[in-house]
Each structure stands twice: as C-alpha cells, then as structure tokens.
Amino acid sequence: LLWRAFVMAATGPVLASGQVMPFVGFGTWKIPKENAAAAVESAIRQGYRHIDCACDYGNEKEVGAGIKAAIDAGLVKREELFVTSKLWNTFHAKEHVLPACQRTLADLGLEYLDLYLIHFPIALKYVPFETRYPPEWIHDPAAAQPRMELADVPIRETWEAMEALLDQGLAKNIGVSNFQAQLLMDLLRTARTRPAVNQVELHPYLSQEQLVEYHAKLGIVVTGYSPLGAGSYVSLQMATGVESALDDPVIKGIAAKHSKTPAQVCLRWGIQRGYNVVPKSSTDARIQENINVFDFELSAEDMSAIAALNRFRRFNDPGVYTKFMGQFYPIFS
C-alpha cells in the first residue's frame, strides 16, 4: 500500500507546460515554524511530491529547510518535487512581483518554483521587506487605527509581471487563487499566457460546481484548498466545530462502508471530481492518512450523496473578515 501511495501521489492533472501536478499536495498553512521543517520532510518521506507554500504563511524558510533535508537524505530529487508558492497582496505592482518571487525562492532555497500564484485578487499598499515580512493584511499595525490600505493596481499589471517570471525561468507555471469566473474571463482577454491553475476553497459544504465545470472547459487546473472544511478555521473564529464535514453523518457512513476515515473520503471526492487537493497537518499519522486515498474509489451514488451536502458555506471570505480591518472587500459577491 505504501508503494502504491508513492506511485499514485505523483500522478495528477497535466498542466499546459506539460508538467504533472500531483493530485495530493502537502499544505503548509498554519503549520508553526518550529514544526514546519520536520513536517515537510515527513511528508516527502511518506510520498508527497507536491508542496503548497505561500509568503503569507510565514514559514517558507522552515519549509525550505524540510525540502533540503529530504533532498540531502536522498528521499527525492528537486526535479521530482512540485513546489507552489503565492504572491502576497502587497506585492501586486509590477515592480514588486519579481523581488517578491526572489524572496520566496531565497527563503525556500530553490532556483525556481513549479507554480507561482496570485494569492488573492486584492491589491494592498506596498510594505517593504525590511519593514515587515510577511506583511499580512494590516498596513501599519502600530497606527492609531490599524487597517488595510488598498493599492490601485489592476490585475492585468500584476499578471504581465507574473508572465515575465515565466520568461526568466523563475516559475515553470503561473496561476491565480481565489478568482471567480468573471474575473478570470476578464484576465483571459489580455493574458499572453493563460493561468495554469486556480486555487480555490473546495470541500463538501462548498462544492462550487459551476466554477469547477468552467475551469474544465478552459483547460485550467483547479486546486482545492481547505478540502476537509471547517477544521483550520475554528481557531480563527471563522467557523464553528459543528460545521465540520468530517462529522457529517453522510460522510461518516460512506467512510465506514469503505473502511476509510471521513477525511480520506473528502479528499477522494475532490480527486474524483478532477482537481488537486492540499490538506495540511503536522502530525505524522494524519500526514500519512491524507495521502492514503488511492486504494479505493467512491461510487457514483457516493459522489452524488456528498455533492448534495453543499451548503455554499465559504470559510475563507474577505467579504466577512476585511470588515474588521477597516475595509469591505467582498471578492466573491
């Protein structure tokens, strides 16, 4: 079974560049710095070949240390890994995109990224590296009234700077995250290179069926973040424990039928819908559990039953939390 996990973990959708993007990625959001290196090395040891990072996660140096440890131990070669990172909101202006990518590469200890995404379609006022890194959402936390400060930077400007990263070989693929269909349509009108990937929130309580279908028609790969739902958001007070799909009777019943866990069922559901999933954990047992999803298949009835659970429940919604940052930015409305 472990051998099968290793083989299947390296399979996935083929991007326009010809690269294979493994179906199951190892998410690094909210993994504490002190745990990140060991967690990444453990994930690679257990078969993960897709690592999902971001400037905003604040742990890219430690993630890079984990990648280096795995390579030094002979577990993997760099070219066998698929590493994703993301451009933060404060670096959308064309003159800031290249330095932001270079900082990420330096922190990760890599010469190139396999995929670089625009993290949100939200441009914020620039914060220099020496002032604060990662900059996060609030422009000046020490201000009398700390708040988000918006920047007037069109997506077209940011995307053209992203395309330049392709030309320079710093990223093999570029894409977006948290983009809805209308914004993507607008971007495609002027893009020289269409996005390879759109990473969006996807789980049984937020199935986004039309968005997934639209991307399939365009040939743009979808990555589903937070594929297990509410768990990561409870501590942030963006969800409640009773909203967990892992406790849903339908999910639990399907899991029992297949002798799998509810988490494995949620991940398998995403994979069978045709997109990548990036669960995160810093616990060895959970890391292994999350990649052991290639030895069973959900039936059409299982898939339909899970699809019927959709509540349109979005946990990561700037339209909600930016209100507490002095702005109102409902990008999904």
Image (cartoon, rainbow, N blue to C red):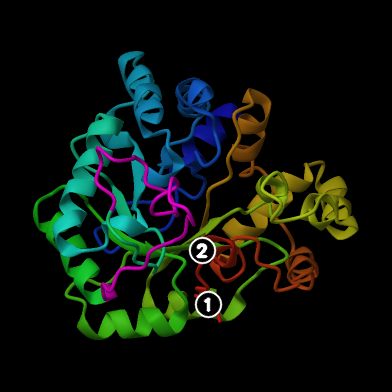
Q: Is 30 located above or below residue 162 in the figure?
A: above
Is 74 left or right of 96, judged from the image as shown?
Answer: right
Between disc 2 and disc 1, the foreground one is: 2
- Residue, x 71% and y 63% (percent of image)? 204
Camera-side residue of 42 and 19: 42
Which secondary structure class fits the magenta region best? loop
Examine the structure image and report whether residue 152 is included in the region drawn in magenta.
yes
Q: Is 108 located above or below residue 243 in the figure?
A: above
- Residue, x 82% and y 41% (percent of image)? 259
Camera-side residue of 177 and 303: 177
User: Total of numbered circles in the picture?
Assistant: 2
Is 242 left or right of 193, judged from the image as shown?
Answer: right
Expressed as whole percent of the image width and height from the top left, the position of residue 240 reads: 79, 54
Expressed as whole percent of the image width and height from the top left, the position of residue 54 reads: 39, 45
**Element under disc 1:** helix
Expressed as whole percent of the image width and height from the top left, the position of residue 205 reads: 73, 65
Is 237 left or right of 71, judged from the image as shown?
Answer: right
**Element under disc 2:** strand
Under mark 2, the amino acid is Val
Per the image, the residue denoted by label 2 is: 200
Is 77 left or right of 46, judged from the image as shown?
Answer: left
User: Which part of the image, by quadrant, shows the N terminus?
Assistant: top right
Q: Which residues are magenta?
A: 127-155
Separation of marks 2 and 1 at Cα, in angstroms:
10 Å
User: Which part of the image, by quadrant, shows the C terminus?
Assistant: bottom right
Per the image, the residue denoted by label 1 is: 211
- The circle drawn on residue 293 is none
